[in-house]
Amino acid sequence: MDLNLQPLAPACVVSGDHFSEGERVASFLVRHGETGEIVRYDMKEAAAATFTPSGPVACRWVKLYKERAADDNAARTMKLTAENLFVTLADPATDPSPDNVRLVQFLSLMLERKKVLRPKGLNHDRTKHVFERAKTKELFEVPVGEFTPDFFRQVQAQLSVLTGEPKKAVAAPVAAIPVA
């Protein structure tokens, strides 16, 4: 799954005020109601309570604002892949929400199977799995969870906001079989 994600906006979408270094910025990934396009909305954390998205919200996170370096390749880093979404949501500086925790748990499972993340065991209090990102050797802690059918239904609903609704299976008509 590759989607293009807009880079962090320099100003709040609600108030229009520019962000300052170290300010808490809330970001939303929203499937735009009319076009179906995935849109990123960035706003000051205080303004998030008054934000009304134009469609279903895939996920939300809060992070400290940091000016982008002049040599940063925004086009390359903003390609939304499962790995980039995981790194964004699992970043220790990001405030986790229950929906994001579920998504991070699913992405860690998927990325472990793809060998993007390496399992390193549990943390000291055994409440989180520790993963190492193969490329950068960064360590991420993911809350321990139970992968139940309900868990996967909730993740599917959350991901369908990003990828679109799954196609419904059409039931084949049942033909009458004559009994001899």
Image (tube, rainbow, N blue to C red):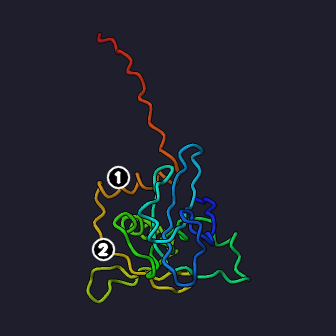
Q: Where is residue 75 in the image (x, y as percent from the top left)?
A: 70, 69
Query: Is residue 10 among the parts visible in the rendering?
Result: yes
> Closest to the observer: 42 or 70?
42
Residue positioned 63% across, 82% down in the render:
67
Residue positioned 48% across, 52% down in the render:
161
Q: In which quarter of the image is residue 108?
A: bottom left
Label 1 sits on residue? 153
**Which residue type does callout 1 highlight?**
Arg
Q: Residue furthest bottom?
A: 124
The CA distance from mark 2 to mark 1 is: 18 Å
Query: Is residue 112 among the parts visible in the rendering?
Result: no
Q: Is residue 35 above or below residue 89?
A: above
Q: Position of residue 113 (x, y in %)?
A: 46, 69
Q: Position of residue 169 (x, y in %)?
A: 44, 35
Residue positioned 33% across, 11% down in the render:
178
Q: Specify which label sits upstream in the sequence, 2 or 1.
A: 2
Q: Quarter holding the N terminus?
A: bottom right
Q: Quarter holding the C terminus?
A: top left
Q: In this view, does 33 lie above or below 144?
A: above
Q: What element carries label 1?
A: helix
Q: What element carries label 2?
A: loop
Left or right of 127 in this view: 172: right
Q: Position of residue 119 (x, y in %)?
A: 41, 80
Residue positioned 59% across, 64% down in the render:
80
Asked whether disc 2 touches disc 1, contact meaning CB atoms under 8 Å apart, the reply is no
Label 2 sits on residue? 144
